[in-house]
């Protein structure tokens, strides 16, 4: 049985993969069962949420949360990876572009938009991750996917042709792609550098720690992973049934709406996450009873 359960908010270092962070966390916490919610590219830094022990089963709920990023868009240079780590593939003369031009160009990228995932990404096509294909020099057709940009602010920087982006967006949004697409709308091209994820839902960069500083005592409880879900407190006599994954009537659990719901005990510990089932019933999607 897992000896350690909880949630950790890490500030990922540049140059590390998200898997590198997980590997170090496993060593630091002496716990093998650790995963992350939402990959950050190696050059990027910022908020990476880790699940430890049984909380790994809740990471999909964290992964669907909105994100916030800051980064720098460099006009006039396109790269193979859409960021500063790639090879230059094209250059453009864009010295005449003003901050007003950039702000006007971003208007069409707010709200619901369609994005084509970059080749250097973790998206799977035909059972293989795109970055694996890209390393072999293979480029495949990628279907555009709907994402949503809730807010997109642009500021000029002291460096000519470089603009600071501040983006609030849905899960699955690629800021590299956003920068490249804005560059094309401006009549040339662009790439992204210095990307930093500052928020994942309610998990913010000010609360993030270096992975080497993790310790069991500072892990957040399992309930933190689903704090955005509607909560319901289960009566003590229901706890045993919930811990065994019982399918219940909505009236028994006293829930309404579409769900899912975070089911807590009287002390606020997470027992399970329930979702709508057939008719007026609900069923567990994750059982995480705390003894």
Image (cartoon, rainbow, N blue to C red):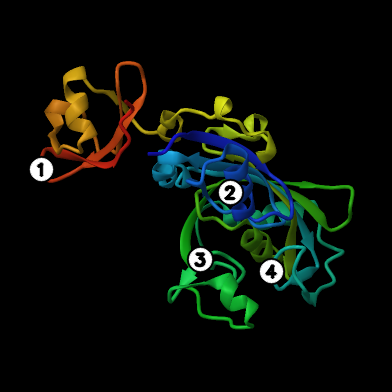
Residue 91 position (above or below residue 74) = below
Q: Earlier in the sequence, mark 2 or mark 3?
A: 2
**Residue holding disc 1:** 279
User: Does residue 195 appear to the left or right of 142 in the view shown?
Assistant: right
Kindly identify which numbered label has been placed on residue 123: 3
Residue 250 occupies quadrant:
top left
Q: Which secondary structure, mark 3?
A: loop
Give the residue at mark 4: 81
Q: Name the residue under label 2.
A: 22
- Element carrying mark 4: loop
Which x, y percent locates residue 136? 62, 82
Residue 44 in the image, given as x and y percentages of width and height: 69, 52
Q: Which quarter of the picture shows residue 93?
A: bottom right
Mark 1 near mark 3, Cβ–Cβ under 8 Å?
A: no
Q: Nearer the viewer, mark 1 or mark 3?
A: 3
Q: Pointers 2 and 3 in contact (CB under 8 A)?
A: no
Drawn side of residue 30 relative to residue 155, left or right: left
Closer to the N terminus: mark 1 or mark 3? 3
């Amino acid at each position: 049985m897992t000896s350690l359960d909880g949630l950790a908010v890490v500030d990922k270092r540049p140059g590390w993969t998200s898997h590198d962070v997980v590997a170090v966390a496993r060593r630091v916490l002496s716990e093998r069962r650790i995963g992350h919610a939402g990959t950050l590219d190696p050059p990027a830094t910022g908020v990476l949420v880790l699940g430890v022990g049984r909380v790994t089963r809740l990471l999909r709920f964290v992964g669907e949360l909105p994100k916030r990023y800051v980064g720098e868009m460099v006009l006039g240079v396109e790269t193979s990876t859409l960021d500063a780590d790639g090879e230059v593939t094209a250059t453009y003369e864009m010295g005449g572009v003003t901050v007003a031009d950039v702000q006007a160009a971003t208007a069409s990228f707010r709200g619901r938009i369609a994005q084509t995932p970059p080749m250097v990404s973790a998206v799977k096509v035909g059972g293989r991750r795109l970055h694996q294909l890209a390393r072999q020099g293979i480029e495949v057709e990628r279907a555009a996917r709907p994402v949503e940009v809730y807010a997109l602010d642009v500021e000029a920087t002291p460096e000519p042709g470089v603009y600071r982006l501040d983006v609030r967006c849905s899960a699955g949004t690629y800021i590299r792609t956003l920068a490249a697409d804005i560059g094309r709308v401006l009549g040339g091209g662009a790439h992204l550098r210095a990307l930093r994820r500052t928020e994942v839902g309610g998990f913010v960069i000010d609360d993030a720690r270096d992975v080497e500083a993790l310790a069991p005592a500072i892990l957040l409880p399992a309930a933190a992973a689903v704090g955005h879900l509607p909560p319901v407190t289960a009566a003590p006599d229901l706890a045993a049934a919930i811990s065994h994954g019982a399918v219940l009537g909505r009236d028994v659990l006293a829930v309404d709406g579409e769900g899912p719901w975070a089911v807590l005990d009287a002390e606020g510990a997470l027992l399970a996450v329930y979702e709508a089932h057939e008719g007026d019933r609900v069923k567990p999607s994750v059982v995480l009873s705390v003894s």
